[in-house]
Image (cartoon, rainbow, N blue to C red):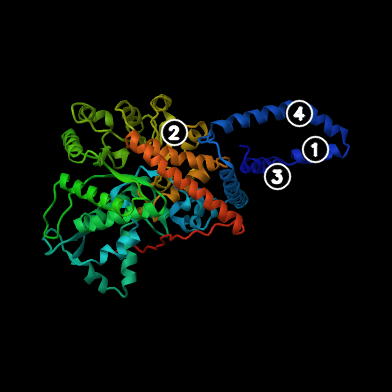
Amino acid sequence: MAGFGRDFEDRKTNNSRMGLGVFRVLALCVAGLSAVCDAIDENSTYWQERQQVLASEQITIMGQDQILNADEQAVNEFLMERKMAEMDASFSSLHYLPSKNFLLVREEIEQTDVFKFLKLMPKGAALHLHDTAMATVSWVVSEISYWENLYMCCVAGDQLLLKFMAVPDTSCNWTLVSDKRASYSSAEEFDRELLGRLSLVLDDPVEKFPDINAVWKAFESTLIAMTGMVMYRPAWEAYLYHALLEFMEDNVLHVEFRGTLPRLYELDGTELTEEESLQVYEKVSQKFLSDHPTTYFGTRYIYAPLRRVDNISTIWDYVNLAKRLQQVCPNYLAGFDLVGQEDLGLPLKDILDPLLTLSEGEVKVPVFYHAGETAWMGMSPDENLIDALLLNATRIGHGYAITKHPGAKQLALDRDVPLEVCPVSNQVLMLIADLRNHPVSGLISEGFPIVVSADDPSTWGAVALSYDFYEAFMALAGAKADLRFLKQLAINSIKYSGLDNDNKEELMNMWQQEWDAFIEEMKRLTSSHGRTINPTFTCVSSTSQPGF
């Protein structure tokens, strides 16, 4: 389709940004200036070649082979008007939201028409998430931190620990959270401080996190504090259920999330085994599905322990546990991964022997490796991409460095292995400052297979998936990507999920029904309400004053 967005951009480019412009030249020709007309004739070959190059580029953008029906075209016109209005305003003011640190502009993003549109859009599946960073931190603080028997303690390095206990143990100088809260001038003051310890939401992130190691250290500190609290079995059941609810309310139908699988514990300190813990995960997921059978499809889990270990024997333990989990929960466990800051963890090539056994024997475990989540080139972290592909990864987590490895890129194309792209995470964790420069932009322009996900949304104050879709649509995909790109993202998320073919088909049908209803409703809203979007949803806002 010609598309309002492309016509609009061509008009802006040729008329406003190139000085004289085609339209003005034609006007002068009509006015009778023969010299100008002769110039048009002399330059006609140039303009034809230029148009051919632009047209050939347009064909390869991811999603451009999607054919929109009449209603989708009308909605696309509205969407592209809003997208180009935001882009043109930013072009003049230089205040372009995806070029700014997400922690500083999240609330501005929430006010844009494009974000409001994406919030309502059925997005298919979220395929790259981490367990203790899925549900909003503000909900955890306002809900779980008010439960009885929650204790807190700070240890070396000012690390906050949180744990539910009937009677505090002697491992730390524990204080009841309720008592600590009561010692503050107000509960709100304490809650703001606690929220700052459980997230990276700060007023001064640039000053607080001067380099990638600093932000990763703070990030991991939030996860340690959160994990101790929510791995209390009743807390985890409430947490996981609420996380799935937030994603469903963000119009996500299916979730695949990763976790290190720390053992759940009871109030008396009793720990469940890893197998028992995963069975609790599955039970909660099934309960959520039974409560929302028409608006949610399902949940699966990827066992993803830490890659930063001292020796290979620990990796053997991981692999053996993964195989046991596959037998205990064959319909719930989607596969295996390794997580943590890739630059500091063992490279895949050093632990090949245990990893190779995941695809051997009677019990086989699919793999979804984080690989290439690094700014380095020619080092172990970026070369993990090659090993992940040779180890038959189903999807590549992040894959940020893949454009530096044409062999790996071609291998991924040949095997149809997509990248799980998490733009907000890449920016907050300091791989890239301006998302317009993200390497995946070139891949999108070539039609390389990707899915977009949220990684650890609660850590940076996001809710579910819409924020990452916004960054992908506005920055990674460029000005000319339209509704077809967004539609392809949703389709990709289903196509590349860990589901079998029958379940993929069922999920695709469910998504298609949601999509058709969305298009119908958007056409109604944009035609009957002055072409504005007024969705009903709540965005979580929070401030932070760290420092217990």
Name the side, left or right, on which 399 lies relative to 316.
right
Q: Position of residue 462 (x, y in %)?
A: 40, 54
Q: Nearer the viewer, mark 2 or mark 4?
A: 2
Q: Give the residue number, with chain letter if any, for mark 1.
A: 26
Cα distance in 3D space between marks 3 and 4: 20 Å
Q: Nearer the viewer, mark 1 or mark 4?
A: 1
Q: How far across and how far down the image is residue 120, in percent?
A: 47, 53
Give the amino acid type for the residue marked by disc 1 in the picture. Answer: Leu
Rendered image: mark on residue 449: 2
Q: Secondary structure at mark 2?
A: loop
The residue that appears at 58% across and 33% down in the rendered structure is 58
Is residue 48 shown above or below 434?
above
Q: Residue at x 34, y 70 (%)?
A: 188
Name the amino acid type tagged 4: Asn
Whether 171 is drawn above or below 398: the answer is: below
Q: Does any portion of residue 366 appear in the rendered image?
A: yes
Quadrant of the frame with the N terminus: top right
Question: What residue would you read off at disc 4?
Answer: 43
